[in-house]
Image (tube, helix red, strand yellow):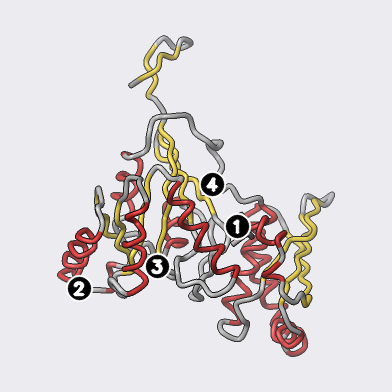
Amino acid sequence: MTSVDEAEGGPKPATRCGIVALIGAPNAGKSTLVNALVGMKVSIVTHKVQTTRAVVRGIMLEGDTQVILVDTPGIFAPRRRLDRAMVKTAWGSAQDADLVCPLIDVKRGLDEAAEKILAGLENIRRPKCLILNKIDLVPKTDLLGLAQEANARASFDETFMISAQSGSGIPALKEGLCRRMPEGPWLYPEDQISDLPERMLAAEITREKLMLRLHDELPYASTVETEQWKRLRDDSVRIEQTIYVERESQKKIVLGQGGQTIRAISQAARAEIAHMVERPVHLFLYVKVRSRWADDPERYREMGLDFSN
């Protein structure tokens, strides 16, 4: 189907636009895949499970097609309110998408987490494609068996085998996603790569550096908020962020001896934020104790999560 461009007097290809929900277990590689498809970093990546909390939308543009990639929180057995909100949001995003793509880590195979996700797809009345990730970590003979087994448990229109880390299979996946998008106008400007405001993306970058630096030393219950974002006369940006933890002992871990840890986190975050905004950044980090921050409705609204669960 084409539309006529009256100014040029010739046919103009119709644009396509649609939403793809990527769902999967924690650490299946959803955020790495979104970054690979978009071509720039829009979602933070760490080895710690449940890194993604908010719903992050990365915007992929291929020719006349715009694909809105929804990086959902990992689906796992929830224990706390925040866990339940994340899992509920992930499944809700799948219900609203034009295409649902479960992502399976082939090294783990069809473990309990993957089995539950495949079973949950029975309630999703949307087109579905299976993505097998990390294919460079297992023998090729194992991939075919895994693909057949997964397709026997759920009805998929197509199966893609990729490595989000190395880029293997990404071009074919891009083509496949674009092919399945409905005709329609783009939802975002051509130069936009994410729906996250710069303030929130900057906070996510700092949270990533915090998690990478401290690994398992810092409990899951920590968060980062951008309190101030001020453009200065020399076109640099002054950013003030607060790292919230639940106990005084956690604050000491984040600060480190003589403030060494917080300085290292700040340096790493500042460099990446400066690259993102393409101007010099002055980053000031503060650490505060806020017990039970994970039960604050305002935090849920900021992350796009439903507090009432």
Mark number for residue 193? 4
Which amino acid, mark 2? Pro
Secondary structure under badge 2? loop
Task: Report the front residue among 80 and 133.
Answer: 80
Quarter occupied by the C terminus? bottom right
Q: Nearer the viewer, mark 3 or mark 1?
A: 1
Name which quarter of the figure residue 152 lies in: bottom left
Secondary structure under badge 4? loop
Circle 2 residue: 139
**239 relative to 180, above or below:** below
Mark number for residue 148? none
Q: Nearer the viewer, mark 4 or mark 1?
A: 1
Distance from the alpha carbon under mark 1 to that under mark 2:
39 Å
Secondary structure under badge 1? loop
**222 relative to 8, above or below:** below
Q: Is residue 294 left or right of residue 105?
A: right
